[in-house]
Amino acid sequence: MRCQLSVIKALAIIACSAGCTGATPGVDAILRSPETTAAIDYRFTAADEALLDEVQHACFLYFWKEVGSPAKLVRDRKKAPVSSIAAVGFQLSSLPIGVERGWITREQGQQRACTVLKSLLARSDNKKFGVYLHYPDMSTGGLSKEGFEILASTVDHALFLAGAITAAEYFGGEIGPLVDRLIAETNWRAYATSPEGYLSMGWKPDDPGNLAGPGKFLDWHWWNASDEERLIYVLAAGSPKSDHAVEPEVYYRLQRPVKRHQEMPPYVVSWPGALFTYIFSHCWIDYRSLKADDPRRFGIDAPRVDWFENSRRAVLTHRQRCIEQASRFKTLAPDHWGLSACSARDGYIVPEIRPNIRDADAWFEGTVAPYAAVSAIMFTPKESLAATRAFRSLTGEDGKPLVWRNPKAGGYGFADSFNLDQGFVCDDYVGIDQGPMLLAIENARTGLIWKLFMRHESVRRALTRLKLEAR
């Protein structure tokens, strides 16, 4: 059974708060450079496009096929008997891609989105203060009886809403009002339980059989300006109900510890350094089109940050640290990199790789999650393409593909993780790992998901309240 990820995150946050204090002196802004522009303007060759199409299609098939009935919610992972509301967010965003790529018809995509949303909205046992259950039943959309964590999770709900927003913008029709209802019913302010106004990670009921009954908010909060947090607070700032919205100042109170590795450019570090914490919000928020934010406009002394540039620096630093460890772990190489949360040999892991060399870093013997390097294609197209090709062509002793699973034979593309030292290749697929690959590649190719998300009324409202200006 998959580990309870919220607990893993909380432990990592505690560890980071103890060991990630301090900042690189003299850094008051992280702004884009000519290298950033080159990454944004990168053009794929025909061979690149063919490879990326193959990877995307494999990811899409996971979200199309691995669903319950009649609710059609996607599985949390292939071996799981439940859905996860975060994976549903990626599922909903996968549908416009499927239509545009010709893998399904528009009618099929719209019908699937309607079924999923109506199944969730019809239930009263799957939400608390409008925030949805982390692991709903994949066939009903309601409370699961499979023994998985019973928790209304703010980050997983944010990923769900982001996906719902893109579906609403693409399909319109009856999907729009359904998503408007989801947004309006989300009472973010109810979860703002810390003195600083930070949002709790979730609500846990006293009775696991009654999410809507008495319970308590988790004591752990979202306090660091990592990718998950920024997505949460953008959505929370954009609520159409003033008594549900979170004040924009809270977004700027998120801590921005700045560090660097050797002579590489400094950047705001995330709580564990796992690569997904520099990728997730970029699946929807088009930071390419935004100027660096400015906390001082809200009376907060913190560095201005261009978050696209920040993630580009973080990815390149992460890759460099992996290269430096290649003599220690044979899985790692210039085109074999990307340590992130994944399903590994010993269960669900969250590596901790920070810019400065630390004994406390958790390498998990160099276990690579292919989706991490592939999803970074938005920031590092050249390096990510090289990794994608390397993963795709890697073979075992029998000469067969080692980490690629052919969709025609029932696979969904890249295995979730592999480790050459351990002789391990994961035989599972995880929805929140398949999803970033699919969305990130599409954004790098066409910007489709960025365009859909950024034009939604609630997102535009959030940008205005946060004073995030277009370039």
Image: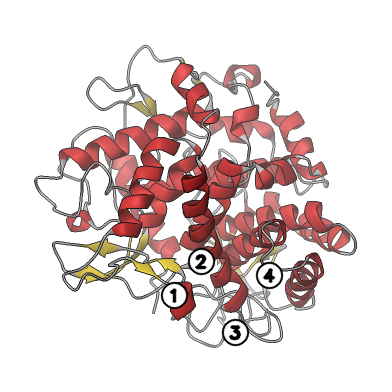
Residue 166's spot in the image, x, y percent?
A: 72, 53
- The residue to which callout 4 is attached is 127
Amino acid type indicated by mark 3 = Gly
Q: Quadrant of the N terminus?
A: bottom left
Q: Measure how far apart labels 2 and 1 are at the Cα level.
A: 8 Å
Q: Earlier in the sequence, mark 3 or mark 2?
A: 2
* Mark 1 or 3: the one toward you: 1
**Secondary structure beneath label 1:** loop
Q: Which residue is mark 2?
A: 58
User: In the image, residue 377 lies at what x, y percent?
Assistant: 46, 42
Q: CA distance from mark 3 to mark 4?
A: 12 Å
The answer to whether 431 is drawn above or below residue 461 in the figure is below
Identify the mark at residue 411; answer none if there is no mark.
1
Q: Quadrant of residue 195?
A: top right
> What separation in Å lies between label 1 and label 3 (alpha carbons)?
35 Å
C-alpha span from label 1 to label 4: 33 Å
Mark 3 or 2: in front is: 2
Q: Which residue is mark 3?
A: 209
* Residue depicted at x 76% and y 29%: 464
Tell me whether circle 2 and circle 1 mark residues in contact (CB < 8 Å): yes
Report which quarter residue 5 is drawn in.
Answer: bottom left
Around disc 2, counting alpha carbons within 10 Å, would you say few (fewer than 14), some (14 to 19), or many (20 or more)? many
Residue at 75% x, 58% y is 167
Which sits in the foreground, 437 or 38? 38
